[in-house]
Image (spheres, rainbow, N blue to C red):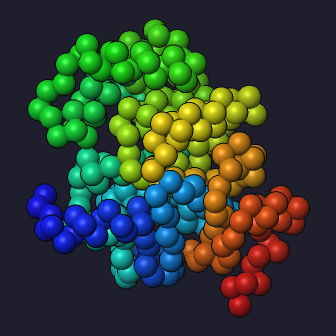
Amino acid sequence: MNFSLASMINSVSAPVLELQNLHVSAEGSPILRGVNLVVGEGEVHALMGPNGAGKSTLANVVMGHPGYVVTEGTILYRGQDVASWSPDERARQGIFLAFQYPESISGVSVIQFLRQAIAARKGLDELSVLEVRLDLAEWMDRLGMDAAFAERHLNEGFSGGERKRNEVLQMALLEPALALLDETDSGLDIDALRVVANGVRTVRAELPAMGVLVVTHYVKLLEEIAPDQVHVLIDGRVVTSGGPEIAERIEREGYDALRPALA
């Protein structure tokens, strides 16, 4: 991809992610209805909302999922309009999505998968297995993961917690500028959630400029990963944004208390 000098300079000063009046549909049905959202470098934003609000849709649209159609509005990544970028191009440029339900791939080990992913991210045709092993071993140690994990087939037979920790491991090694965490807490008990959250904090400490958008239903994850801003999405619209006090209000009153804001 060719960038002009002006666009490169702009990308340095621009927010990591900016959504402008984003409207999205799937199979002809509208899901997102005019979302505006800005995530700056080093910021953690939480996107909360009830089931069916469009939270996971938003994360998948930013990643370029072909099942969704942007009918209006713009997605800017570091000042660049990504409308024409394929999902793999977005990944190579530094957008990372941790899936709510990571898929298993039989016959492909964790290290094989990461070797190919890191090579693509760095724009290399080939990457030394030894180099990947060294980086992988260091990060697995920092994340408290068993060394044998690297040789297992990707997500095959993994527990929910192992799948989510594997996503955090991928995030650490791929060094994204923008990380979208789609319901990382889904299906985890409190102990597993804390382990995963600690992993996210460890990666953030290493990559302080990384912008993070955390998609979640629940306040528990936000107690472990303190967000700079919380946004509430209901019926495809951001109805309110603010600090952690919004999450605390949701914990007390639920999402229905925020629905009148749509009127």
Residue at x 48%, y 36% (from the top left corner): 206
Across and down, in percent, residue 216 comes to 64, 53
Q: Position of residue 215 (x, y in %)?
A: 58, 55
Name the residue: 66% across, 78% down.
Answer: 239
Q: Is residue 101 left or right of residue 220?
A: left
| Residue occupying the far right of the picture | 252
Residue that lies at the very extreme toward the bottom in this rendered image: 263
Q: Is residue 250 left or right of residue 243?
A: right
- Looking at the image, is 126 positioned above or below residue 86? above
Q: Quadrant of the N terminus?
A: bottom left
Compared to residue 202, the image places residue 64 above or below, namely below
> In the drawing, does residue 36 fall left or right of residue 111?
right
Q: What is the x, y in percent for residue 50?
A: 69, 63
Q: How many numbered markers are drawn?
A: 0
Image quadrant for the C terminus?
Answer: bottom right
**Image quadrant in which you'd find residue 28:** bottom left
Quick check: 29 above or below 130? Answer: below
Residue 151 or residue 157, whichever sits in front? 151
Pick the residue in front: 207 or 249: 207
- Is residue 55 visible from the viewing direction of this image? yes
Residue 143 figure quarter = top right
Can you name the residue that lies furthest to the top here?
148
Q: Look at 27% across and 51% down and name the residue there.
A: 93
Can residue 254 be seen from the camera position used here?
A: no
Task: Measuring from the top left, give residue 164's x and y in whole percent.
Answer: 54, 33
- Give the residue at x 58% y 18%: 144
Q: Is residue 148 above or below residue 230?
A: above
